[in-house]
Image (cartoon, helix red, strand yellow):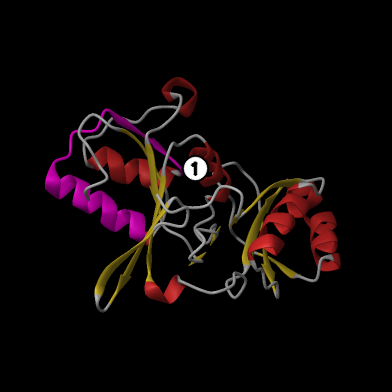
Amino acid sequence: MSYIEDGMLLGVGTGSTVGEFIEVLKARKTRLRGFVSSSRQTSERLKSAGVAELDLNAAGELALYVDGADEATRHGMLIKGGGAALTREKIIAAASQRFICIVDDSKLVDRLGAFPLPVEVIPMARSYVASELAKLGGRPVWREGVITDNGNPILDVHGLTLTNPEAMAMEDTINGIAGVVTVGLFAHRGADVLLVAGDGGIETILPHGS
């Protein structure tokens, strides 16, 4: 990938797309300064590639964050969290100068919301947050048996359809509910570059024109 340079400090997300990206790094023998991982799963994969893992507190600002998404629009807005790493992914995205999101064309949509919106919550607040999400028009479903790396459950919210301005407002509203850790809606801090894989090859989308 032309965006990756030797000596770079890299943030890396979670999921099957990221797994393929890590295999590319290994094959190309890219010499990174280090990486900050969004999940234990990714940490194990990157360690096998021989790259040093750094804590974000020590690393500071990252040059680049690479991750996938469950849904993406051409405006760079995303739904993430299918792999239950949404909070750490959002933190790393915020700490990165550039965010590259890699998806296949089935995940490129006009409006977000067909994929259930993940919300990480403090355990004692799960029922309360669910009732508040229902007031917003969603149908929250507890993702039973899943605990995040932060030790919290996830509610998957069905039935929301979000256009660009609605997505930004909804992100703020859900994050403002007491007991919510974060929502997997990446509207304020979306992707700077979308790489969309399809039958015709890779389409590069620059949501902000740069």
Task: Look at 43% across and 36% down and name the residue there.
Answer: 97
**Residue farthest to the left, as pictured:** 28
- Direction from residue 155 to residue 97 in the image, left or right: left
Image quadrant of residue 81?
bottom right
Q: What residue is rendered at 13% in x and 46% in y?
A: 28
Residue 163 falls in which quadrant of the image?
bottom right
Magenta span contains residue 22: yes
Q: Is residue 132 visible?
A: yes
Residue 51, above or below 201 = above
Q: Is residue 155 visible?
A: no
Tell me, yes or no, whether the highlighted magenta stretch contains residue 159.
Answer: no
Q: Provide residue 180's location: percent of width, then percent of height.
A: 74, 48
Extreme residue toward the front, this view? 209
Q: Is residue 125 above or below residue 166?
A: above
Point out the stretch of residues depicted in magenta: 17-38
Three-letter amino acid code at disc 1?
Answer: Ala
Local crowd at mark 1 within 10 Å, few (<14), some, or many (≥20)? many
Q: Quadrant of residue 77?
A: bottom right
Identify the residue under disc 1.
93
Instruction: Please identify the residue farthest to the bottom as the structure is shown.
Output: 199
Q: Is residue 136 left or right of residue 40?
A: right
Point 70% across, 75% down: residue? 159
Residue 164 rendering spot, x and y as whole percentages: 63, 63
